Amino acid sequence: MTTVAPTLIESTLQPNLTLVLVTVFLVATGTALALDRSLVRVLLGMVLIGNGVAVLYLVISGRAGRAPFVGEDPAAISDPLPQAMVLTAIVISLATIGFLLALSYRLWQVSGTDDVPDDAEDARIQRLALEDQTSSTYDPSEASTTTSDELAEEGVVSGAGSSGTEPSATEPSGTEPSGTMTARAGGDPR
Amino acid sequence: MAQLLLLHLLAAVVAPWLAKVLRRKAFPVLAVAPAVSFGWLVSVSSDVRAGNLPTQRISWVPGLGIDLDFRLTTLSWVLALLVTGVGALVLLYCTWYFAERDPTLWRFTSVFTAFAGAMLGLVLTDNLLVLYVFWELTTVFSYLLIGHNPASSTNRRAAMQALIVTTFGGLAMLIGIIAVGVHHTYSISELLADPPPLDAVTVTALVLLLVGALSKSALVPFHFWLPGAMAAPTPVSAYLHAAAMVKAGIYLVALLAPAFAGAPAWHALTVGLGLLTMLVGGWRALRQHDIKLLLAYGTVSQLGFIVAIAGLGTKTSALSALALVIAHGLFKSTLFLTVGVVDKCTGTRDLRELSGVGRRLLPVSVPATLAALSMAGIIPLAGFVSKESALEALWQDVQTSTPLPGPWSWLAVTGVVAGSALTVAYTARFLWGAFATKPGVDPTPVKAAHPGFVLSPLLLGVGCLLLGLLSPLESPWLMPYAVSSPLGDTPPSLALWHGLTVPLGLSLVSVAVGLLLFVRRDVVGRAQARVPALVDGERGFSRTMRWVDRGAVETTAVTQRGSLPIYLAAILIVFVALPGAAALTRGTLPSIRLWDNVGQAVVGVFMVAAAVLVLVTRRRLTAVMLVGATGYGVSLLFVLHGAPDLAITQMLVETVSLVVFVLALRRLPTKFTRHPHSPSRTWRIALGVAVGASVGLIALVASGGRTADPVSAEFPTEAYAFGHGKNIVNVTLVDIRAWDTLGEVSVLVAAATGIASLIFVRTRNTRLSRATAKALPSSNPARGTWLHGGRTMRKEKRSVIFEVVTRLVFHVMLAASLFLLFAGHNQPGGGFAGGLVAGLALVVRYLAGGRYELDEAAPFDAGLLVGLGLLVAVGSALAPLAFGGTILETTAVDFTLPPCGEVHLVTSLFFDIGVYLIVVGMMLDIVRSLGTGIDRQIADEESEQEREVART
């Protein structure tokens, strides 16, 4: 069908404008779709981008030619290497489609929509940042780990422990990290 | 020496078991490890003195310069003696310290023994990287020991502080070590024998090493962690303060001092911060009421003193630093151990409550007094001798102005005298507080102490006295280290009496001032209460930690928006801004062809139109069809390009994915909904256009960049010579680039498994239900139907024509798929295409006859097929090894098979069979999950609803 004059697989490339333009459009529309919230649209966008990249491989292949078989004129065949690369990519794209579809279906099953929600944990951290708060695992206690000598001076705290294995276990009140964590988690709207 | 470490490791490993069996009697057994090590160290002492330094090398990672080198120098010998001797006595002491039924013994015994081993390794190794490993091991073990009682939040926080501070220092040190190692050498002995020139890298590395040492030895501004660490059980404190952990920092300073004492910033960091620490520690010790805490601040003060003296770097100071380390190790361990006894026998450590204990606990108060006098530097104890020597070193500095210039040397002497005065004062406070009979305080009730409990402090306390009396005998053992310093003259021997010298005078002044401070302690206390704590490292630490935490929250809040479109847009914007902009501004466009043939343009227009329409439509299925249209367009472009394999595969994949889309989307809403937080459409399209344009531009510029002949120019000849096949693309897949294919089929396996696990959340779908197994209405015999499974479907869903066609076509499709597989090596086809056709045949069976029909057609688990395929592919890849070939090598075998005649078998066929099986398995997984799995969920929900209706 293609009657191209015999040429070697070129060491210089003359890109095919038509194929480049097809790539541009496929990638552009695919990207616009991939930026959507709906997971199915994201998937369709990825498929479009994938198709665009497959065409891009044709650009890199150089001239169209005869099918790459031994026995054909080696000077007239198309470049086989990009074809081998695209072939596996095509099959993997099928696997990707299946996986993302299963993901979309599962998302719909769990949340009633296939829209990808914002991460709740990140939203919580942003609220902390807005309120100039520390993270939930931060231990806010600034009490000294030794009996503070100022306090000892005033006789507020007994400086000595009762037994050797339990030296001066003066618990600072309400500074358990777990306590603050539950308090913060309680304020989470989710 | 490695054997000693192994002994400790072995002891640590069996310790939990020993503790379970022997309870606290495990301690004396475990003490054998350090005791044996101590014995060995004593046995080689004459070698060390004579300079025949024992060395040992075990090659570990030679490529990185990491060898398990061990060597014994005077310095490491002294430290090792201290580590093992004190370690053995402290372990012995633990026998009576812990309760018989203490449930934490199994953990404590093990960690403590490992800690002792790590410390021993630290001082024995000759490799900086190995030293770092032991260094961090002591950090980790001390963390576990300080946090011995995790129920107390004070203990937990003290342990965390110690961990963070010393790890911070350790990391700084690691950078320093690597800088030294890359620049020079990792071997400590080589580094000391041939110090590198003091250029910027070496000085920076040195400062970083010192940061590590100072944080470990609790010098200002890191001093706060050590008093907090006394939350640990008393034997741990004794070991930590006297012999291990904090001595690691001093060891490092003493190790580097002979070679690097003259470096910039060295004296400021060691002598300056050391003396400051001596004063801060002594000042705060004076205010404590807990005698253990008093001792802890005393340790801070003493560590500052020792680092200052070791850092000075003259011969005399080196000698006195080593003497100080020994004296401090003896008296501080004695004091902590006696505090432990007092604590156990009276139940308190508050010096306001203790009264009259000294007289009734004589076996404790006598060694404690000896040790305390040694700490204060009173004649004739070890502490006096070493302090005299230190003052002598400083006085030499004043006279010669080296290494510290005039005013600084005077400042140093004044600092040490002031620090010694504080030491005398807090020592007096300790002795008075712990043992004196105080007027107005009832005598504290005292329980008798077990003789074994006081044995260790007694031995160590007597050691303080003996070492002082026998000090002239001590010097020759220490001298080899002292003379390794280049500065100053050979020092006079250690002795109790050097005559009426200036250092003696300074000593007397400090004792007098110290006693005065103690006698007028009420005045001093009031003065102290008015002066705010000038150096409050702990508050600085809390602020730093808060600042780090806040910084992390803010950074996370800015970078982690939690929104998929934003993350994606960030990546894409970078793509446009960097490679895209570079192609636009720097790229040169090559000459361009319009097309190879007009057909490409026709197909292209058709594809672009479909792609643009996808953006417009709001119906899901329309969008899927349009995307499919672009896929078929791609297939046509492949045909026009001369790529039949690609065209076949693309066509098959496109068909399968259309079916899969419809199967998966059948339950989802028919239209896309508008999400409130979606980025606006204009914005998305603008970014899309930018990305598309960038891709196009880069494609053009990159195409013009090709200069070399493509690697594939040789493929036609190679394909037949090595791959024995005529289809070059297929040979590329199964031979030339077979590694790629192997990776890609692994991706398929992972994806197939992922799909199945998303739908069948708990188990893989192994529950097959074949149509014949299902109870079919008996009035409807199986004979005469086209498909068994069809009868399980609802009437309105059945299509007889479809069933008939399926029955006729299914086996033909399977045959075709096998043909593609076997012929693929020489004609269009191959494992991928063949697998897809077989999978499509299964899809057709499912569509015509439902899920029971699918199980009828494929009565096995998809996972089995996928796994089998991977096994065949990997097996055929490895098989050539058995015949002396290389992995994935292809050979051709010709033989005669009677009915078929000549057979030309190419071994890569087996690899292709693996690919085929994996693709079929993946297809089966997709249909089982998105077809059968969803069918079953629908059926379950419907029967659930029916039951609901029936109930109401």
Image (cartoon, coloured by chain):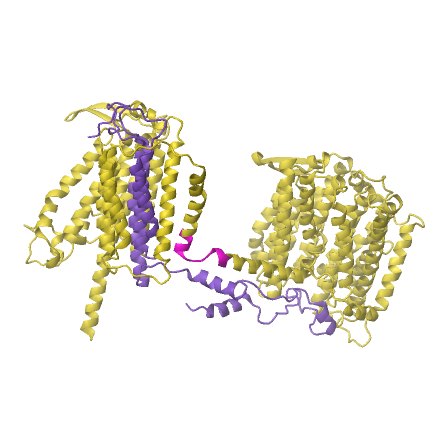
Chain colours: A purple, B yellow
Q: Number of numbered discs present? A: 0
| Residue B698 in the image: above or below residue B380 | above
Quarter of the picture holding the N terminus of chain B: top right
B710 left or right, relative to B835:
right
Quarter of the picture holding the C terminus of chain B: bottom left
Does residue B771 belong to the magenta stretch? no
Residue B139: image x %, image y %? 62, 52
Q: Residue at coordinates 64% horizontally, 64% vertically from top-left?
A: A165
Please state which of residues B61 and B257 is positioned toward the viewer in this rendering. Answer: B257
Residue B679: image x %, image y %? 37, 57
| Residue B242 in the image: above or below residue B822 | below
Residue B869 lies in what quarter of the image? top left
Q: Residue at coordinates 32% horizontally, 35% vertically from top-left?
A: A59
Please state which of residues A116 and B100 is positioned toward the viewer in this rendering. Answer: A116
Residue B714: image x %, image y %? 34, 24
Q: Residue at coordinates 41% horizontally, 57% vertically from top-left?
A: B563
| Residue B613 in the image: above or below residue B148 | above
Residue B826 lies in what quarter of the image? top left
Most common SS among magenta residues: helix
B503 left or right, relative to A66:
right
Please state which of residues B365 and B617 is positioned toward the viewer in this rendering. Answer: B617
First to last magenta residue range: B556-568
Q: Is residue B696 visible?
A: yes
| Residue B828 in the image: above or below residue B353 | above
Residue B599 lies in what quarter of the image? top left
Q: Is residue B875 visible?
A: no
Residue A110: image x %, image y %? 32, 62
Does residue B562 belong to the magenta stretch? yes
Please state which of residues B215 and B464 is positioned toward the viewer in this rendering. Answer: B215
